[in-house]
Image (cartoon, rainbow, N blue to C red):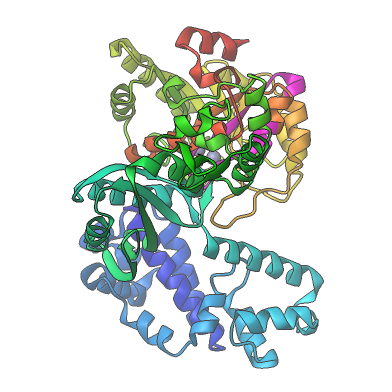
Amino acid sequence: MENRNKEIANLFYRIADALEIKGETGFKVVAYQKAARVLEDLTQDVAELLASGQLAEVPGIGKGMAEKIEEYLKTGKIKRYEEVMKDVPEGLLQLLEIPGLGGKTIHLMQKELKVKNLDDLKRVIEDGSLEKLYGMGKKKVENIKKGIELFEHAQERMPIYEALTIAEEVIDYLKGAPGIKHISTAGSLRRMKETVGDIDILAAGKDGRKIIEYFVKHPKTIKILAEGDTKGSILLDTELGHRQADLRIVEEECYGAALQYFTGSKAHNIKLRGLAKDKGLKISEYGVFRGEKKIAGKTEEEVYKVFGLPVFPPEMREDRGEIELALEGKLPEIIDATDIKGDLHVHSNWSDGVMTLEEVADHGKKLGYKYIAICDHSQAAKYAHGLSPDRLKEQIKEIDQINKKLKELRLLKGVEVDILADGSIDLPEGLLKKLDIVVASIHSGFKKNVTERIIAAIKHPLVDIIGHPTGRLISGREGYDVDIDKVIEAAAEYGKILELNAYYDRLDLDEFNLKKAKEKGVLIAIGTDTHYAHGFGMMRFGVGIARRAWLTKSDIINTLPLDKLLKLLAA
Ligand SMILES: [Zn+2]
Ligand SMILES: [Zn+2]
């Protein structure tokens, strides 16, 4: 439901933006923006409101907007939207995708500086004319520059969640291909980087041509980009957008060498090539060779064994010292998905989640978890129906009731409490004491004294964990204005835990900050921050990033059995 409200809100925002691009101001624009904001804040489904005849009475909506909403719900379209969009040039519409750039500014840039597209925009930034434009100035231009960077970054790469979802669907399909033997993801996708450039799939089979023929017939193919005997490339129309997938077929005897080679990274492979050279060997995607003779290639194990090396977890293959350590027999054993005993950040329908507490428990049981921390929002998070102290008290009681019935799994009484503008915590101490786990997060004031506020929260005796410590969103938002090194130091000093928020668009802390935290001895909690059942699956991305940071079982608190976890949190 939230989605439908949000979809219509987005359309209204875009109409307002498009009107502004065309130079319209005032009443009409404001009406769309206002209606969009109202829709975003609405707690009820617009369809329900419409059905009960109350929609037009919602302040800020009115009759005209209600009609457009009805049109959308019935036809999936808003005619006005299409009309408005029709005469906005493509290049200018694209500029709207740049964070920090609105319709009004785009209109002015077009009128005064003849900006028609992204290239033009870059030009007027470069030659300084944008800065001189009325109402602009240095700071705004800096922000737009950052926005362009983020936009271009998002264009280039897709989030790991997207890439893996599509890849796994294709792999599932390919299992039905004639004569297919082995199949795997490759490249940065297999190495679980937070964003991925290409969906690379590698397979071994007898008749490459036939497998490729089968591949390009994938039901979601909208365009065949390449179709050969060993390589194919298709454009897929998926729920997640148009995405390209590439398949390469090799012979079974070469599969291990090819998988090793195409998994990369480039830097890791260069190191390996150096080792081969030292031994008078050659390594390629076809195998390891002494002169003409192939001495390994069928499996990755075989390939690495030639050099006295183990099969590295793909996440470690970045030439960050893994080869040297392995040669000394000192490669650390990184965390495995099976080490995870529970999820430490889950929202229920008591705040902005959709699951009841019982449903959360049911899903946890299915996942084989021993515990799940219920961490609904506190009251400051109004947009998320944050819990008042009284509501939280009620929730605690209910969790106690549910736990009486549960055997293999325990719901932990927790909260995701807001860190307020002055660095204080949005709940009284007496109540915090009743909880098993307290996650404190910043949800507003992203530019205001964030470092100081987080450190104040770290010093609070009843806060256990800092949630999504940098606030960055991979798809766009840059994160808080925070000195993360200072936060890590404070966490180390006060013995507090930092979160690895496993939601694919957050992955916060990221792999580099996780590494820093580990070096300072700071413990990490992985939580999916899920608001719906499907989101429990995000844990794998959190684990992937933890593996990329070389975290071990002992670095992560949700590998502990329940009694030890509770003891640690109580300490
Ligand atoms: Zn949060
Ligand atoms: Zn949360």
Q: Is residue 354 visible?
A: no
> From the viewer's perspective, is 417 left or right of 404?
right
The front one of 367 and 493 is 367
Residue located 78% across and 34% down the image? 486
Specify whether residue 503 is painted magenta: yes
The front one of 487 and 2 is 487
Residue farthest to the front, as pictured = 292
The front one of 74 and 34 is 74
The picture quadrant where one finds residue 509 is top right
The picture quadrant where one finds residue 499 is top right
Q: Position of residue 376 (x, y in %)?
A: 47, 33
Q: Position of residue 123 (x, y in %)?
A: 71, 82
The front one of 158 and 387 is 158
Residue located 50% across and 29% down the image? 311
159 lies above or below 108: above
Question: Quadrant location of the C terminus?
Answer: top right
Residue located 77% across and 21% down the image? 493
370 lies above or below 99: above
Q: Is residue 38 visible?
A: yes
Residue located 42% across and 42% down the image? 352
Specify whether residue 150 is painted magenta: no
427 lies above or below 104: above
Q: Position of residue 229 (x, y in %)?
A: 31, 62
Q: Quadrant of ligand 1?
A: top right
The residues colored magenta run 492-515
